Amino acid sequence: MTTTATLTTTTTNTSSTTTPFQSSQDLRTLVTSTRSLLPPSEDYHPREERYWNNDQTHYQPLQHTETLGIQQLALSPQRTLAATGGPRISFWTSPLDKSLHHTQQRFSSAQIKAKQISTSGQLTTAVAFRHDGQLMAVGNLKGQVQIIQCATRAVLTTWSCSTLPIRAVVWQDDQTVWVGGDDARLSKWSLQSTKPTPITYAGHGDGITCIRLQDEYVVSVSADHTVRLWMKSPEANDEIQSNDIDTKEALAVWRHAGPVQDIVWVPSSVQDTNAKSTACCITASGTELTVWNPNHVQLLQQVPTRHVKTITALCYILRRRRKTNASSSSKKNEEEDDFQHCVFTAALDGALRLHEWNPQTRQLVSLIRLSLPSQQPETSTPSTMQRAITALTVFSHRGCIVLACGFSHGQVLLRTTAPPPTVMKRRVQEPPAGTYAYFMRGPRVPLTTTTDDLDTTVVAATGNKKRKYKSYDLCLKQFRYADALDEALATRNAQTVLNVLEALGQRPNGLDTALSNASTLEPLISFCLSFLRKQHTQHQHATTCVLGVLNECWRRRANNEADELWWKIRQAVQQEVQTQTCLLRTLGQIDGLLGTRALEGNQTDDD
């Protein structure tokens, strides 16, 4: 930096009198020598820059009402993204279908609205979906783990694991959950077990920050500068007890220079593309990445990244890419494609970086820094995007690599790369048999050699297409009553909402299930109030049933936010009762007059 300042001063002072350089060769020599004294800059990889930081990369923010930082992100098999970091769990069912990455906008200002699950006011810190996506495990600051059913948003069970915060939860199978937190103990819980206490693995000296499963191993990452390798079965660890703090029960202990934040498994051979057999692991400690061989407990490599602050998240994904020397023919074989093992790191400095893992040499190479909206001056993005990244997850969607980033101020951002170029085949629509166009197809139709190839079927065009299910119909079909009611209210169609309410009322405990776990009941109360005021007699029964269930739900919550709405409902009900009373009296008088008139007519006929 000192040489650069001196060079600038000399050029400014002598520019008006004499030329400081006699030739362009002298200028190149001085610039080269000056550049060698500067700190190392970013390596330039043209191929990676063209794919990851091109103009077609789209950024989609997701709405998150909590002002706290995002603690953890999780993705279900049904592409449901969940975020923890407040008294409620925010999740997005289909954020990618509503993304605008195919448009010309690089940054979408319209945020996708999030749905929420209440956790009784406890601050959530960890979340994990089961393999089928039907259940989710949520940890909070009070050391509790709640098992929540995703379809109904109901809490099935609650485990009191510790008095300290929970930092990591992982599903092993359909019934087993691994839990770790600030109490420095790794516990194994089961939904089928009747024992109140779980199986505990002790040995860490500080809080557990991450848990990963690999084959028969369980890896726990801790802030005590160590990573410990355990067996899933307690017999392999000599029946570790909850009061045992000896570190010899772990199969292996990997020591680092600083607190370890995250770990990821990568394949150790070219044939093993899913990282399920002999695999290596990469750990993140401070600003460095460390590659380990768990089979021989061997340190393979230490990679100093260009992060300025601590790395908080680590992700791995396998990407298929085209070779640069591929043939120009339209049909390309799979041998012309190679795979790129991508490792992503996110840190507190707000940087997102890409690294490439080579299974043949077992080496990790740092490539480029991925662009974010805060680093694009041409986009009108908020300045809050320059905060620290605290959570990260990566997945593939329709040929695109999607990075979900959680920031320290509560913002969730989707970074979607451009889809790979594909050759679109022209779809040839054959005319149906029995039509004029079928008999006038011309010479382009190939000749048939046997009678089996002849199409003698006559199809009559009916024009009746199968109606597609609406979003709320699909939710009702899948017994997701709360989601069905949310989708119906989102349509802003009164008849649709009433149809869904009547369908829920006909199912056993349908209304109770749909309304018991709703985040807010004010929109539905306002909807019922509008129907009471309009006096829709054909829907009074459904409205009355819904109001009864709403009254019970609101009474259990003991919330006074909608007292004004309930007062208006009371006035509307009283007015409706008075109207019905007057109407019944009038009908009674009319019936009396008609009855008297009929009796007088009968007496006249008898006389």
Image (spheres, rainbow, N blue to C red):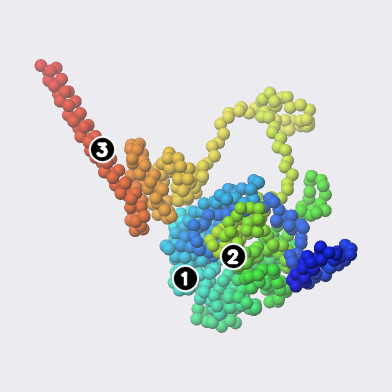
Secondary structure of the residue carrying tag 2 is loop
Secondary structure of the residue carrying tag 3 is helix
Which residue is under mark 3? 579
Please state, as top left, top right, bottom left or bottom right, where the N terminus lies in the image: bottom right
Residue 247, given in percent of the width and then of the height, sits at: 58, 81
Distance between mark 1 and mark 3 Cα atoms: 56 Å
The answer to whether 303 is drawn above or below residue 109 in the figure is below
Which residue is under mark 2? 388
Q: Which of pointers 3 and 2 lies earlier in the amino acid sequence?
A: 2
Residue 143 disc label: 1
Residue 135 relative to residue 438: left or right: left
Q: Residue drawn at (81%, 66%), measured in percent from left and top?
A: 14
Which circle, 3 or 2, is nearer the viewer? 2
Q: Which of pointers 1 and 3 lies earlier in the amino acid sequence?
A: 1
- How many marks do you count on the picture? 3
Residue 183 relative to residue 430: left or right: left
Q: Residue drawn at (52%, 74%), measured in percent from left and top?
A: 182
The answer to whether 65 is drawn above or below residue 592 in the figure is below
Q: Which of pointers 1 and 2 lies earlier in the amino acid sequence?
A: 1
